[in-house]
Image: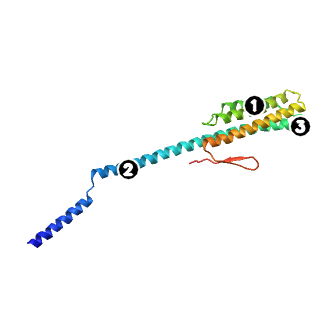
Amino acid sequence: MIIRNKHKEIEEVERMDEERFWEISTGTVTFFLTALALIVGVITFLSFYDGMKVKNQEEIATYISKMNQFLTSSNQYSDSVEIALKNGTALEFTKDDDQEFRTLVARATQLSVPTKWEEHREAAVELISARYMLFYQYQQNFRFGEKDMDEKFAELDSLEKVEKEVLLTSFDASGITYRETEEGKITFSIKTY
Protein backbone atom coordinates (compact mmCIF):
# COMPACT_ATOMS: atom_id res chain seq x y z
CA MET A 1 0.00 0.00 0.00
CA ILE A 2 2.80 2.34 0.63
CA ILE A 3 3.95 1.86 -2.94
CA ARG A 4 0.47 2.63 -4.25
CA ASN A 5 0.21 5.73 -2.14
CA LYS A 6 3.65 6.84 -3.29
CA HIS A 7 2.64 6.20 -6.87
CA LYS A 8 -0.60 8.10 -6.29
CA GLU A 9 1.29 10.97 -4.66
CA ILE A 10 3.75 11.14 -7.55
CA GLU A 11 0.86 11.25 -10.03
CA GLU A 12 -0.80 14.02 -8.03
CA VAL A 13 2.42 16.03 -7.88
CA GLU A 14 2.95 15.59 -11.63
CA ARG A 15 -0.66 16.63 -12.29
CA MET A 16 -0.29 19.66 -10.05
CA ASP A 17 2.99 20.63 -11.76
CA GLU A 18 1.29 20.29 -15.13
CA GLU A 19 -1.65 22.42 -14.01
CA ARG A 20 0.71 25.04 -12.60
CA PHE A 21 2.60 25.03 -15.87
CA TRP A 22 -0.55 26.04 -17.74
CA GLU A 23 -1.71 28.54 -15.13
CA ILE A 24 -1.39 32.15 -16.28
CA SER A 25 -1.34 34.83 -13.68
CA THR A 26 -3.42 37.98 -14.16
CA GLY A 27 -0.25 40.06 -13.88
CA THR A 28 1.24 38.26 -16.87
CA VAL A 29 -1.94 38.75 -18.91
CA THR A 30 -2.05 42.42 -18.01
CA PHE A 31 1.60 42.87 -18.97
CA PHE A 32 1.16 41.21 -22.37
CA LEU A 33 -2.06 43.10 -23.14
CA THR A 34 -0.41 46.39 -22.18
CA ALA A 35 2.61 45.58 -24.35
CA LEU A 36 0.34 44.63 -27.26
CA ALA A 37 -1.69 47.84 -26.88
CA LEU A 38 1.52 49.86 -26.79
CA ILE A 39 2.83 48.18 -29.96
CA VAL A 40 -0.47 48.77 -31.79
CA GLY A 41 -0.46 52.39 -30.60
CA VAL A 42 3.08 52.98 -31.85
CA ILE A 43 2.28 51.39 -35.23
CA THR A 44 -0.87 53.50 -35.54
CA PHE A 45 1.02 56.68 -34.66
CA LEU A 46 3.78 55.91 -37.16
CA SER A 47 1.23 55.20 -39.89
CA PHE A 48 -0.59 58.45 -39.14
CA TYR A 49 2.68 60.40 -39.09
CA ASP A 50 3.82 58.83 -42.36
CA GLY A 51 0.46 59.66 -43.95
CA MET A 52 0.73 63.29 -42.89
CA LYS A 53 4.29 63.46 -44.22
CA VAL A 54 3.21 62.00 -47.57
CA LYS A 55 0.28 64.42 -47.79
CA ASN A 56 2.59 67.37 -47.07
CA GLN A 57 5.08 66.24 -49.71
CA GLU A 58 2.28 65.84 -52.27
CA GLU A 59 1.12 69.41 -51.49
CA ILE A 60 4.68 70.63 -52.02
CA ALA A 61 4.96 68.76 -55.33
CA THR A 62 1.67 70.28 -56.51
CA TYR A 63 2.81 73.75 -55.48
CA ILE A 64 6.16 73.36 -57.25
CA SER A 65 4.49 72.09 -60.41
CA LYS A 66 2.07 75.02 -60.57
CA MET A 67 4.70 77.62 -59.72
CA ASN A 68 7.04 76.12 -62.29
CA GLN A 69 4.30 76.54 -64.93
CA PHE A 70 3.96 80.22 -63.98
CA LEU A 71 7.72 80.75 -64.04
CA THR A 72 8.06 79.00 -67.41
CA SER A 73 5.21 80.99 -68.98
CA SER A 74 6.57 84.29 -67.71
CA ASN A 75 10.04 83.34 -68.92
CA GLN A 76 8.75 82.75 -72.44
CA TYR A 77 7.45 86.32 -72.59
CA SER A 78 10.59 87.88 -71.11
CA ASP A 79 12.87 85.77 -73.33
CA SER A 80 10.96 86.97 -76.39
CA VAL A 81 11.38 90.58 -75.29
CA GLU A 82 15.06 90.06 -74.48
CA ILE A 83 15.77 88.51 -77.89
CA ALA A 84 13.87 91.29 -79.66
CA LEU A 85 15.75 93.99 -77.73
CA LYS A 86 19.15 92.44 -78.34
CA ASN A 87 18.46 91.90 -82.06
CA GLY A 88 16.75 95.24 -82.53
CA THR A 89 13.60 93.58 -83.90
CA ALA A 90 10.02 94.47 -83.12
CA LEU A 91 7.50 92.14 -81.56
CA GLU A 92 3.77 92.67 -81.55
CA PHE A 93 1.93 91.69 -78.41
CA THR A 94 -1.85 91.83 -78.16
CA LYS A 95 -4.04 92.97 -75.31
CA ASP A 96 -4.75 89.28 -74.75
CA ASP A 97 -1.03 88.69 -74.18
CA ASP A 98 -0.99 91.50 -71.63
CA GLN A 99 -4.11 90.17 -69.91
CA GLU A 100 -2.71 86.64 -69.86
CA PHE A 101 0.51 87.86 -68.27
CA ARG A 102 -1.40 89.91 -65.65
CA THR A 103 -3.49 86.86 -64.83
CA LEU A 104 -0.31 84.85 -64.51
CA VAL A 105 1.07 87.29 -61.94
CA ALA A 106 -2.22 87.28 -60.01
CA ARG A 107 -2.44 83.47 -59.97
CA ALA A 108 1.16 83.16 -58.77
CA THR A 109 0.43 85.64 -55.98
CA GLN A 110 -2.69 83.74 -54.88
CA LEU A 111 -1.20 80.26 -55.16
CA SER A 112 -1.73 78.24 -52.00
CA VAL A 113 1.60 77.74 -50.29
CA PRO A 114 2.67 74.74 -48.18
CA THR A 115 4.37 75.21 -44.84
CA LYS A 116 7.97 76.47 -45.11
CA TRP A 117 7.48 77.61 -48.74
CA GLU A 118 6.19 81.18 -48.23
CA GLU A 119 9.63 82.67 -48.89
CA HIS A 120 9.87 80.78 -52.18
CA ARG A 121 6.50 82.08 -53.35
CA GLU A 122 7.61 85.63 -52.56
CA ALA A 123 10.86 85.17 -54.53
CA ALA A 124 9.01 83.58 -57.47
CA VAL A 125 6.32 86.28 -57.55
CA GLU A 126 9.00 88.97 -57.44
CA LEU A 127 10.71 87.35 -60.44
CA ILE A 128 7.45 86.98 -62.39
CA SER A 129 6.53 90.60 -61.61
CA ALA A 130 9.93 91.84 -62.81
CA ARG A 131 9.48 89.87 -66.02
CA TYR A 132 6.04 91.41 -66.43
CA MET A 133 7.47 94.93 -65.97
CA LEU A 134 10.01 94.27 -68.73
CA PHE A 135 7.21 92.97 -70.96
CA TYR A 136 4.93 95.90 -70.10
CA GLN A 137 7.60 98.51 -70.74
CA TYR A 138 8.47 96.91 -74.05
CA GLN A 139 4.78 96.77 -75.01
CA GLN A 140 4.39 100.48 -74.13
CA ASN A 141 7.31 101.33 -76.46
CA PHE A 142 9.58 102.32 -73.60
CA ARG A 143 12.95 103.28 -75.03
CA PHE A 144 15.63 100.98 -73.68
CA GLY A 145 19.18 102.20 -73.90
CA GLU A 146 21.99 99.71 -73.77
CA LYS A 147 22.61 100.56 -70.12
CA ASP A 148 18.90 100.13 -69.30
CA MET A 149 18.82 96.74 -70.99
CA ASP A 150 21.92 95.57 -69.16
CA GLU A 151 20.44 96.66 -65.83
CA LYS A 152 17.10 94.96 -66.54
CA PHE A 153 18.72 91.71 -67.61
CA ALA A 154 21.12 91.77 -64.64
CA GLU A 155 18.15 92.32 -62.33
CA LEU A 156 16.30 89.37 -63.87
CA ASP A 157 19.39 87.16 -63.56
CA SER A 158 19.78 88.17 -59.93
CA LEU A 159 16.11 87.43 -59.17
CA GLU A 160 16.39 84.04 -60.91
CA LYS A 161 19.38 83.15 -58.70
CA VAL A 162 17.54 84.25 -55.57
CA GLU A 163 14.49 82.18 -56.55
CA LYS A 164 16.66 79.11 -57.13
CA GLU A 165 18.51 79.56 -53.80
CA VAL A 166 15.24 79.92 -51.92
CA LEU A 167 13.88 76.86 -53.74
CA LEU A 168 16.83 74.76 -52.56
CA THR A 169 16.56 76.16 -49.04
CA SER A 170 12.85 75.28 -49.00
CA PHE A 171 13.64 71.72 -50.11
CA ASP A 172 16.11 71.41 -47.24
CA ALA A 173 13.63 72.88 -44.74
CA SER A 174 10.98 70.39 -45.85
CA GLY A 175 13.34 67.42 -45.75
CA ILE A 176 12.92 66.65 -49.45
CA THR A 177 15.93 65.28 -51.26
CA TYR A 178 16.82 66.87 -54.56
CA ARG A 179 19.53 66.71 -57.15
CA GLU A 180 20.88 69.46 -59.36
CA THR A 181 22.18 68.48 -62.78
CA GLU A 182 25.14 70.08 -64.54
CA GLU A 183 22.69 72.03 -66.72
CA GLY A 184 21.18 73.55 -63.57
CA LYS A 185 17.94 71.55 -63.61
CA ILE A 186 16.64 70.38 -60.27
CA THR A 187 14.96 67.03 -59.74
CA PHE A 188 13.39 65.86 -56.52
CA SER A 189 11.53 62.85 -55.26
CA ILE A 190 8.70 62.49 -52.81
CA LYS A 191 7.05 59.55 -51.17
CA THR A 192 3.55 58.68 -52.38
CA TYR A 193 1.13 55.85 -51.79
Amino acid at pointer 2: Ala
Which percent across, then down, holds residue 101? 76, 32
Q: Alpha-carbon distance for marks 1 and 3?
A: 21 Å
Which percent across, then down, holds residue 84? 87, 36
At 43% across and 46% down in the image, what residue appears? Answer: 41
Residue with the mark numbered 2: 35
Q: Alpha-carbon distance for marks 2 and 1?
A: 59 Å
Residue with the mark numbered 1: 129
Question: Is residue 73 in sight in this rendering?
Answer: no
> Of helix, strand and loop, which one carries label 1?
helix
Please name which of the two marks, 3 or 2, marks the residue nearer to the observer. 2
Q: Which colour scheme appears in the figure?
A: rainbow
Count of labels shown?
A: 3
Query: Outermost residue, left direction?
Result: 1
> Of helix, strand and loop, which one carries label 3?
helix
Mark 1 vs 3, N-terminal side: 3
Residue with the mark numbered 3: 86
Q: What is the crowding at mark 1: few (fewer than 14 residues within 10 Å), some, or many (at least 20)?
A: many
At 18% across and 64% down in the image, what residue appears? Answer: 13
> Of helix, strand and loop, which one carries label 2?
helix
Amino acid at pointer 1: Ser
Mark 2 vs 1, N-terminal side: 2
Q: Nearer the viewer, residue 96 or 13?
A: 13
Amino acid at pointer 3: Lys
Which percent across, then down, holds residue 174? 61, 41
Q: What is the crowding at mark 3: few (fewer than 14 residues within 10 Å), some, or many (at least 20)?
A: few
Mark 3 vs 2, N-terminal side: 2
